[in-house]
Amino acid sequence: MQLIRDWFSRTFNDPQVVVLGLVLLLGFGVVLFMGNMLAPVLASLVLAYLLEGFVRYLERWRVPRLAAVTVVFLSFTAFLLALFLVLFPVLYRQLVQLVEQLPAILARGQALLLQLPEHYPQLFSEAQMREIIDGLRRELIDWAQRVVTSFSFQSVVVIVTLLVYMVLVPFMVFFFLKDKRLMLQWLSDHLPRDRGLASEVWREVDLQIGNYVRGKFVEIIIVWAVTFITFSLFGLQFAMLLAVMVGLSVIVPYVGAAVVTLPVAIIAYFQWGVSPEFAWLMVAYFIIQALDGNVLVPLLFSEAVNLHPVAIIVAILVFGGVWGFWGVFFAIPLATLIQAVIKAWPSAASHREQAQGEA
């Protein structure tokens, strides 16, 4: 207990450590208790971080800040609008086709399960398989009923939420970019002057988050495009729908790739069965995943991610459980923040002791 009291007294005698601790507590408190309400703000911040790099590039060519922000914002809006108009009809059509074929896929899956007792009678019995099938059928019916019920009650809420995002997010993105320096100056004016440690952590985390958001966007686009081209060349059904799923799966490192492999394998199997086409498609898919993890990620995130894979998975589980989707998306930046604080914290205490020793 004496050691703990000594450490607490020694550490929190440093005003810089106190300021950093208060800022962290305030930030995590706002995220924890107001995260859902501030979701449009967080989405706007993500997009602002994404576009800030392009704005800085134009500023290096002596383009005024307002003109650079306007050009980048309008270009990105046009890109998203074109992507939505081209992509959404294809995804909707393929999703409808998948729902129409779902009964046939389930029937074939049931037939495959019933064949297991014939091929492996020492492991499976027909009664066990029928019990499993009945249980799966009940679970599927219950899930479908819950989806229909929740959709009927929440459809209006979802529509209103989308309208709010469509109006507020572009508005806030533009002003986050346009008035970035003013906002940071206002925040700086309301923080204590003795905040060197907090400023050091902020500079590192700000750089990491910017690199991470921009790198993640590029990774999603590249993985989606390469996967779609590959699936289309093989003639896989629902190529665009599956490619979008694979592209978005990179938001959740390791876990996303493992989860999205299942629907890809199921669709390919029910289209071709156990055949050379199925085997070659899965080989190509795993090559894409390997290149993403071993080539693309190191190139894009060499400056943004310096974390052990176990630390990344733990961060995803912890922050995802606390904060849902945004916790999963920001798991790596938040883990980087914790790493930056851990690295900077002892240095503050040692600087304090050094200053006391010199005095």
Image (cartoon, helix red, strand yellow):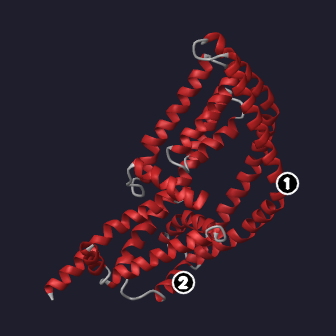
Q: Quadrant of the N terminus?
A: bottom left
Tell me where residue 262 sits by quadrant: top right
Q: Residue at x 69, y 16 (%)?
A: 126
Amino acid found under the numbered disc labelled 1: Ser
Residue 66 coordinates in the image, percent (x, y):
60, 77
Camera-nearest residue between 49 and 100: 100
Residue 63 coordinates in the image, percent (x, y):
54, 73
Q: Residue at x 48, y 88 (%)?
A: 190
Tell me where residue 172 sits by quadrant: bottom right
Q: Residue at x 69, y 57 (%)?
A: 80
Q: Find residue 111 and name its label.
A: none
| Up-down relation of residue 157 to residue 95 (above or below) | below
Which residue is the site of mark 1?
A: 152
Examine the rendering and report whether any part of residue 337 can be seen. Answer: yes
Which residue is the site of mark 2?
A: 182
| Mark 1, other Cα within 10 Å: few <14 / some 14–19 / many ≥20 | few
Examine the rendering and report whether any part of residue 90 can be seen. Answer: no
Amino acid found under the numbered disc labelled 2: Leu
Residue 332 coordinates in the image, percent (x, y):
47, 57
